[in-house]
Image (cartoon, helix red, strand yellow):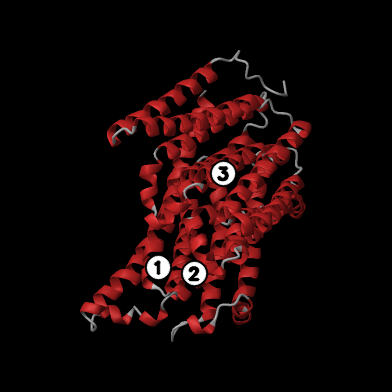
Amino acid sequence: MSIYKKLAGQTAIYGLSSILGRLLNYLLVPIYTRVFEAGEYGVVTQLYSYIALMTVIFTYGLDISFFRYFQSEKGNPKVYSTSLMSIIFSSLFFGGLIILFAPQLSGIIGTADDIAKPGQSRSLYISMFAAVLAFDAITAIPFAMLRQQNKAKRFVFIRLVGIVSNVGLNLFFLVICPWILKSNPTSWIASIYYPDFGVGYVFVINAISSFVCLILLLPEILRVDWSFDKQLWKEMMIYSFPLMIAGLAGMINETFDRVLIPILIADKSTAMAQLGIYGACYKLSILMTLFIQTFRYAAEPFFFSHSTKENPQKTYADVMNYFVIVCGFIFLGIMLFMDVIEVFIGEKFRSGLPVVPILLMANLCLGVFYNLSIWYKLTNKTRWGAILSLIGAIVTLTLNFALIPVLGYMGAAWTTLICYAVMMIISYFLGQKHYPVPYKVGSFFYFIGISIALWIAGDFLRGAIHPGKVFSVMINLVILLIFIVLAYIQVRNKNSYLRPTSGK
């Protein structure tokens, strides 16, 4: 049980930086939407969507390839040096190209002149965009090494410094400086703050915070022996290239519904409002998303390190079982306490709450898919990662075009669930063929089934007896306790009817 406790502990530690990173977006959005005009904030949204896409290209799956080859090469330092040198060169090269052609790129992506105030520069936005990409890509390998070495505390410390610097600088330049100048126009603040620079501060601040992380990682960067193994690099690139394709397809699966909603909804007068409702309610599934993200940080090196141990398939099956239990608990907790959770979004957005259980289940399927993906990573069949993500992208595009015009944002939610469920199911059957793991499929349906059943029972019970708030909370806590007890009984009962479907 100790290895599972270790995995759970690392998941919790990595989760601290992930949770605060996500909260950063929530803390800054209210500021941005009050400081900037709609068109200016549109630039922020636009360029950050490109950053999400281009980050996949700048890292080209090399951080995952590093884990694989560091393990198979038994800690050969050339794996680290080759990975780091490759990504430093590519980041500087591609980042330099973006900066060089920033004026042309700003025209291509449609950053309009009429939203820029005097003193703002579209080319500067693109240049800062390139700097963020380069700094983040270069730090990806040192961060991966910290994870490989189980230095979770240092990993989280550096992440938190970057987050705090980002939030602090945003508050200083976008809130404090304007407030000081308003009351004292001759203050020394006027020498460092330029109101007309506007949205440019967002990109400059992000570049600074990314650079701070790079500086803090210099000990991990400078201690490398700077030896480049060309043959090893070729093997790593063959392994990682499909992962990059999978990452690009994954970005379509993750974000393209929000691109298509305002395009495909027939009533253009309500299209953006529907997108806003969908986007706000999408964020209510953040607890599931955070758990999955933090689990991945800890699980990837954990899975690789246990691949050479005795009967690793049993370990992977047990981890999946615990993973589904936690996801079922999160789903049930969110749905039972929706009357509390919904206050995080405005009342006028709450008409979209029916998408929340659908999106929670979609994220659960995605998390299971991440667990299942170990089969193609351990067997060096990473092309299947790309194929599965491309299948998901095809499902996403096809169903969004079919359902959004009919169902609006509900169509987008159902598309997300179907996409991830299809990827999960196909990956399971392929994995059982190439790298059989005795996953307890019965347990999956059991835990998901009881979490849904208990949620429905809780809603029915509260609707029937109309309890006060205190008694309603007590009912919810009892229901959560019932789930925990049922999960405990199933885990302890090794001879239950929930048998493994394959493997030894």
Residue 92 locus on image (x, y percent): 61, 68
Q: Which residue is mark 2?
A: 44
Q: Nearer the viewer, residue 462 or 396?
A: 462
Q: Amino acid at mark 2?
A: Val
Decide which of tag 3 and tag 2 comes sooner along the chain. 2
Q: Amino acid at mark 3?
A: Asn
Q: Nearer the viewer, residue 331 or 123?
A: 331
Q: Residue at x 68, y 58 (%)?
A: 401
Vertical placement of residue 476 versus 24, above or below: above
| SS at badge 1 | helix
Decide which of tag 1 and tag 3 comes sooner along the chain. 1
Extreme-top residue of the structure: 495
Measure the alpha-carbon separation of dots 3 and 2.
26 Å
Q: Which residue is mark 1?
A: 32
Q: Is residue 223 visible?
A: no
Residue 496 locus on image (x, y percent): 60, 15
Measure the alpha-carbon separation of dots 1 and 3.
28 Å
Q: Residue at x 67, y 22 (%)?
A: 500
Decide which of tag 2 and tag 1 comes sooner along the chain. 1
Q: Nearer the viewer, mark 3 or mark 2?
A: 3
Q: Residue at x 52, y 16 (%)?
A: 492
Q: Which residue is mark 3?
A: 363
Q: Amino acid at mark 1?
A: Tyr
Callout 2–callout 1 Cβ contact below 8 Å: yes
Q: Nearer the viewer, residue 414 or 78?
A: 414
Q: Residues within 10 Å of mark 3 (few under 14, many from 20)?
A: many
Q: In screen coordinates, is 347 left or right of 116? A: left
| SS at badge 2 | helix
Q: Is residue 95 visible?
A: yes
